[in-house]
Image: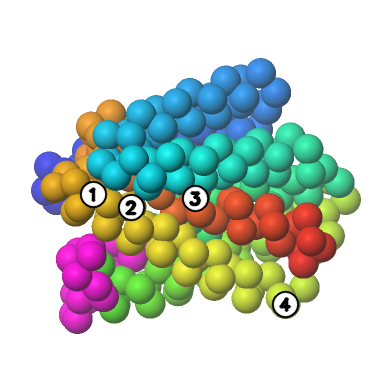
C-alpha cells in the first residue's frame, strides 16, 4: 500500500464519522460546518479559476449548490425523508468515488478522457456498480433508521445511476479546471485527498440535481 493511499484511508476514517455526526446533529453544528466548507470551497475555486467570468459563474453555482444542501437537510422534511435523501446522495457519491478508484486501479484499461488521465472506462463501470450495490444496501436497511420510512419504488435505481453519472461529470469538470490551472489538487487541506473541492466535486453537482427532483415531485 503506497503512502498516498494510506493517508487517503486514514483521513477518510477521521472525516466520514465526524461529517456524519454533524449531519445527524443538524441545526447549529451542521449549519456552521456547512458555512465553513462553503468558505473553503470558495477560496479554492477562486485560486483554481483564472478567468473572471468563470470565477464569478462558479461562485454563483457554489452558492446555489450549498443552498440546496442546506434545503435538503433542514427544510424538505416529511417523515424524515430529508435525511433519507441527504444520506442517499452521500452514499451514491462516496461509493461512486470509491468504485471508480478501485476498479480503475485494479482493472486499468482504456482512458475515459484526456481531461482526467486517471479516469478509465473500467473505473466508470466500477463507479456505477459499487454505487448500485452500496445504495441498495442503504435503502434496504433504511427502515431501521427512519421513522415511518416508505421504501421508494424501482425508479430510485434510475436515480442512483443518474446521480452517479452527475457525480462523475462533476469530478471531471473540476479536473478540467485543475489541469487548466496546472494544479494537481484544489488544495492541500486533507492528507491524501487534496482540497475540499477535490472531495466534494461530485456532491456539489449531485445535491442541486436531487433538490430539483425533490421539489418537482420526481422523488
Return the x and y of residue 119 as percentages of the image width and height: 25, 67
Q: Is residue 87 left or right of residue 9?
A: right
In front of the other: label 3 or label 4?
3
Q: Which stretch did the figure color magenta? A: 99-118
Q: Which mark is nearer the camera, 1 or 3? A: 1
On residue 203, the disc is 3
User: Whole-Å distance between the Cαs marked 3 and 4?
Assistant: 23 Å
Marks 1 & 2, CB-CB < 8 Å contact: yes
Q: Which mark is residue 174?
A: 2
Q: Earlier in the sequence, mark 3 or mark 4?
A: 4
Camera-nearest label, 4 or 2: 2
- The secondary element bearing badge 3 is classed as helix
Location of residue 146 with respect to 153 vertically, above or below: above
- Residue 123 within the segment the image draws in magenta: no
Q: Residue at x 57, y 20 (%)?
A: 32
Please give the residue where the numbered disc 4 appears in the rendered image: 154
Q: Secondary structure at mark 1?
A: helix
Q: Residues within 10 Å of mark 4 (few under 14, many from 20)?
A: few
How crowded is the residue under tag 1: few (<14 C-alpha within 10 Å), some, or many (20+)?
Answer: many
Counting residues from the start of the chain, the first of labels 3 and 2 encountered is 2
- Which mark is drawn over residue 146? none
Q: Is residue 67 above or below residue 160?
A: above
How crowded pointer 3 is (Cα within 10 Å; few <14, some 14-19, many 20+) is rated as many
Disc 1 to disc 3, C-alpha distance: 17 Å
Q: Nearer the viewer, residue 65 or 25?
A: 65
Frontmost of labels 4 and 1 is 1
Earlier sequence position, callout 4 versus callout 1: 4
Mark 3 vs 4: CB contact within 8 A:
no
Residue under circle 1? 178
Q: Which residue lies at the image location 48% right of the left edge and 31% below the top edge?
A: 38
Amino acid at each position: 500500500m503506497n503512502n498516498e493511499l494510506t493517508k487517503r484511508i486514514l483521513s477518510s476514517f477521521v472525516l466520514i464519522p465526524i461529517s456524519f455526526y454533524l449531519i445527524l446533529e443538524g441545526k447549529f453544528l451542521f449549519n456552521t460546518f456547512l458555512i465553513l466548507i462553503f468558505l473553503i470551497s470558495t477560496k479554492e475555486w477562486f485560486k483554481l479559476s483564472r478567468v473572471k467570468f468563470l470565477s464569478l459563474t462558479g461562485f454563483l453555482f457554489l452558492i446555489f449548490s450549498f443552498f440546496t444542501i442546506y434545503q435538503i437537510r433542514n427544510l424538505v422534511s416529511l417523515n424524515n425523508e430529508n435525511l433519507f435523501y441527504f444520506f442517499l446522495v452521500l452514499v451514491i457519491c462516496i461509493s461512486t468515488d470509491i468504485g471508480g478508484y478501485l476498479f480503475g486501479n485494479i482493472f486499468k484499461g482504456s482512458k475515459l478522457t484526456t481531461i482526467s488521465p486517471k479516469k478509465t472506462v473500467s473505473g466508470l463501470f466500477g463507479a456505477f456498480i459499487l454505487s448500485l450495490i452500496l445504495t441498495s444496501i442503504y435503502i434496504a436497511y433504511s427502515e431501521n433508521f427512519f421513522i415511518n420510512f416508505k421504501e421508494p419504488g424501482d425508479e430510485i435505481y434510475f436515480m442512483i445511476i443518474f446521480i452517479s453519472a452527475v457525480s462523475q461529470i462533476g469530478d471531471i469538470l473540476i479536473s478540467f479546471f485543475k489541469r487548466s490551472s496546472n494544479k494537481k489538487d484544489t488544495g492541500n487541506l486533507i492528507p491524501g485527498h487534496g482540497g475540499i473541492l477535490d472531495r466534494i466535486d461530485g456532491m456539489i453537482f449531485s445535491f442541486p440535481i436531487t433538490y430539483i427532483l425533490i421539489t418537482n415531485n420526481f422523488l
